[in-house]
Every structure is written in C-alpha cells, then in structure tokens.
Amino acid sequence: MVVRVLGIDPGLTRCGVGVVEVGAGRRASLVAVTVIRTSPSTPLEKRLLTIGDGITALLDEHHPDAVALERVFAQHNVSTVMGIAQISGVALHAAAKRGLPVGLHTPTEVKAAITGYGSADKRQVQNMVARVLGLADIPRPADAADALAIAICHAWRTPATPADGDASTLTPAQQAWHAAEKAARGSGAARQAPGGAGRRNRLGR
C-alpha cells in the first residue's frame, strides 16, 4: 500500500509544503515540494489568503491521503505562535473540507522519526531527508526540508507504534520515535521543544 502525505511547515513569511509517497518497507519518494511566500508588509488577512490558496491548490493537484503539520506547543514569541496557529487553522480547514485526516507532530517527534535522535540538529534532519528520498541535494530553503520531514514522519507513524505497546520489535529509529511520542504526550504543559523559544528553534532552526 502506498500512502501519500502532504506536510506543512507553517510560517507566515515562508510556509514550506512537501508531498511524499511511502510504500512497502517504508520506502519514501518525493512527489513535490515548494515554499509559499508572503511579504511582512502585506496585511495579515491577505497573507493568510495567499497561503490558504497555495495549500488548497496543492491539495487539489496532488490528492494526498493525509495532511501533516508541525505542532509547536511552547513558544515565548507570541507573534510567532499566533502566526503558526493562524496558518494551521487555514490548513486544517482545507483538509477538513476534503475529508482528509490530519496529524500534528512535535519537532522532537519529527527529528526522532527522521534521524533516530530527538535532539538532532537542522543539518542532520536535512541530510536524512535527502537520503531517505534519494535526493542528490538537500531541499532548500530549510522550510522545504522541514515540510518533507513532517510528511515522512507522519507516513511512518503507524508502523512506528506497535499495536501491543511493545517497542522491542522496532528499529532503533522507530524506538526513538516511539519514546519521543510518549514523552511528548505525557509531559503536558511543561513540555518544550529542544533549543528553547522562537521559530528558529523549531526543527533545529
């Protein structure tokens, strides 16, 4: 069975969007990747419209089976949190209109899924995204690579979580993902992504 996932790295100035297909043996391939850009000088409502229209066009073009978004649960920069939340709302609405399931994944979960290490840095994640997808070069800018990482993480999510709760049968990378997921779910309001606050610390930036 082949699963197609559209991943979104939400940002007002640069919103990364990547589409991957994952089949048997967790083999992943690139379908599309882009960055939707808006200017800080543009009114907020028009920026959200541009991003929403861009996401809608990509959903209609590539017909994914699911949508995945980065979930940022701890930020000290209120304006950054608001922007991410607003874009996420636009994306969630577009997915819901098409009856698509949505997955929200923390930076730690994504890093663990891609590299096997929940505290991996940006370069490690980018290198592994290129390797997993068989790309000669790392997708640029970083928002594009992050969107692909989120999509891959979501596509790998089901096999990464054993039905009986026994993580001993998983690969090292899957075990790291499973541990990161449990920690993210169980630590409540005290949770914070590695590296502290601010958009630059999401997925290692």
Image (cartoon, grey):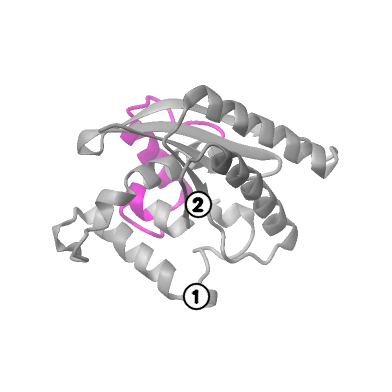
Q: Is residue 187 above or below residue 184?
A: below
The residue that appears at 43% across and 59% down in the rendered structure is: 108
Q: x%, y% of residue 73?
A: 56, 64
Who is closer to the viewer here, 145 or 163?
163
- The residue positioned farthest toward the left in the image shown: 169
Marks 1 and 2 close (CB-CB < 8 Å): no
Compute the Cα span from label 1 to label 2: 20 Å
Q: Sequence-wise, which precedes: disc 1 or disc 2?
A: 1
Q: x%, y% of residue 131?
A: 33, 34
Query: For mark 2, does the 10 Å Cα neighbourhood hold few (<14), some (14 to 19), or many (20 or more) residues?
Result: many
What amino acid is labelled 2 in the image?
Leu
What amino acid is labelled 1 in the image?
Gly
Residue 169's quadrant in the figure? bottom left
Q: Quadrant of the N terminus?
A: top left
Who is closer to the viewer here, 40 or 164?
164
Q: Is residue 55 magenta?
A: no
Residue tagged 1? 188
The residue that appears at 49% across and 40% down in the rendered structure is: 7
Who is closer to the viewer here, 11 or 122?
11
Residue tagged 2? 203
What secondary structure is found at the residue carrying circle 2?
A: helix
Q: x%, y% of residue 164?
A: 19, 64
Where does the magenta region start and end?
112-141
Q: Is residue 133 magenta?
A: yes
Residue 8 visible from this viewpoint? yes
